[in-house]
Image (cartoon, coloured by chain):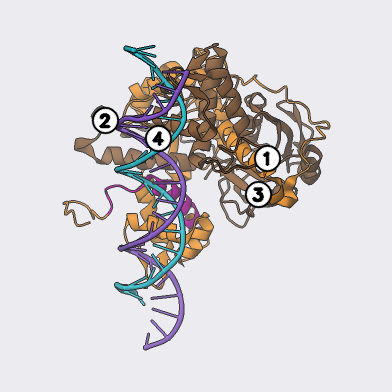
Chain colours: A orange, B brown, C cyan, D purple
Amino acid sequence: MATGRTHRPATRSRGIPEATVARLPLYLRALTALSERSVPTVSSEELAAAAGVNSAKLRKDFSYLGSYGTRGVGYDVEYLVYQISRELGLTQDWPIVMVGIGNLGAALANYGGFASRGFRVAALIDADPAMVGKPVAGIPVQYIDDLERIIEDNGVSIGVIATPAGAAQQVCDRLVAAGVTSILNFAPTVLSVPDGVDVRKVDLSIELQILAFHEQRKAGEDGEGPLPSAAAVRAAAASEAATAQAAAQAGSAAAGRKGPDGDVPAVMPA
Amino acid sequence: MATGRTHRPATRSRGIPEATVARLPLYLRALTALSERSVPTVSSEELAAAAGVNSAKLRKDFSYLGSYGTRGVGYDVEYLVYQISRELGLTQDWPIVMVGIGNLGAALANYGGFASRGFRVAALIDADPAMVGKPVAGIPVQYIDDLERIIEDNGVSIGVIATPAGAAQQVCDRLVAAGVTSILNFAPTVLSVPDGVDVRKVDLSIELQILAFHEQRKAGEDGEGPLPSAAAVRAAAASEAATAQAAAQAGSAAAGRKGPDGDVPAVMPA
DNA sequence: TAGATTGTTAATCGATTAACAATC
DNA sequence: TAGATTGTTAATCGATTAACAATC
């Protein structure tokens, strides 16, 4: 406080906690819904409920951004939407590229929520020549060889990787070399990146495994379990339920080699 | 320590930290890769590198599970794979149901990594009658009206929601009422569940927003930024890049109503 | 034995929460 | 003014990390 810089409010600027940053999008979503319903103001209690957090946490989070509320009244919805959007960098347009247009990549590309939130799919890239030129979500797929040119032409700094695991590191390296400094990784592999590059990962299989851990705990505690009713029927009848010989056939997606690690069967997490 | 219960090692049993649980799948993945290469033992340093964490953290994490290493030697790969699998509950088979077989749901169902990790897709469920009976990833889609029967017949306790946001809470309520106690939510909405039910969420848009925040920080720091080289070309040339009029056309997916909130255009996060 | 590496301790750091003074 | 609600404090809790004694 009162560090007296020159050009900015200075109140925030340094160090919004990571946990707070991760919740800002939740608040923004809840606020956007209120805005669409033309609700003018909202209390920390109401907004916290809508975002699924407690109100003390919300007020603490907002305190890092500044004092945008009015005691006795609450927060102005429109004003807060603007402030959080600005804080998150959503008042500008972020061109992104997606690499690996298999089942998952195509599903993600078809997701419409990008544009409305400050993101624009600048290009879809795949390593399968047969995919090139085919429109996915209205955007023609481009060939992996043009990756560097595409990044530069569009000033892309955020990349989404939806390739098989074996190709992900290689793609990541090329993205970073071309100037990308933020990566969202859907491939089930750990990516190595230099300092200054942010990576976030989304991994279906890991999420399921975490759920399985807790599920096992619930089942194991028997007597004093939190949900005696939901002890569930538990297996016993595998009945029909086709045994999912699904697997592979992931289609295109890949972007080159089949990494040193054996697995990598399909499109996502492992 | 030494709480002296009766039927189990007692060492662990109570309270593995949530942060540790969330890393166990990463360790397991790295160990599985080593196992496939027939590597017999691994040190905390090596394994930590493969999992993308530091070795002190890894050793601390493992200390919650028990003493499975050998000083001066390291960890036996096969043994550790077994212990972590058991801890995560992956030595048993978890039938799961997926509700909402649109673009995203279909992509997830096609992902082959489930079965190999203790999960089995017991059923795919959708609200679109036109989808019913059509095989996705080799499994015929079933109608939403049969949700309760399917849960019970298969003893399902884990559900995956891949519906539009507007349908997610309703689907969630039905899953919970039918006995599901763990939910993986891909719909861009906050779910309310009773105590004892775990929810994890995967949200593309939130991840991108978090990246945008950090990206903005990098760009704003100018002079002393961590990656002066990667200041990137930044926009200036939006060149061709079709402006993604993609949006909606998400196909089936939906599972009923179109919730009170207006948005929910397509398949995923918002 | 000497070298290597675990398992644990203790310090530090960051996040959460309740409570309440400030103030609309 | 009285009532409501924010913004902040301070206590608590949980996670991370370095260091090193234990021990293979």
What label does residue B158 carry, if any? 1
- The answer to whether residue A11 is magenta is no
The residue where tag 2 is placed is: B227
> Residue B179 versus residue B12: which sits nearer the camera?
B12
Residue depicted at x 58% and y 45%: B265
In the rendered image, residue A143, in percent from the top left (x then y), is placed at 47, 18
- Tell me if mark 1 has few (under 14), some (14-19) or many (20+) residues whose alpha carbon lies within 10 angstroms of its own: many
Specify the subunit that label 2 lies on: B
How far separated are the C-alphas under marks 4 and 3? 30 Å
Q: Quick check: marks 2 and 3 in contact, CB under 8 Å? A: no
Q: CA distance from mark 4 to mark 1?
A: 36 Å
Q: Pointer 1 and pointer 3: residues touching (CB < 8 Å)?
A: no
What chain letter is assigned to the residue under label 4? Answer: A
In the picture of the structure, the residue carrying the numbered disc 3 is B167
Q: Residues within 10 Å of mark 2 (few under 14, many from 20)?
A: some
Secondary structure beneath dot 2 equals: loop
Local crowd at mark 3 within 10 Å, few (<14), some, or many (≥20)? many
* Cα gap from disc 2 to disc 4, whole angstroms: 19 Å
Q: Which residues are magenta?
A: A12-31
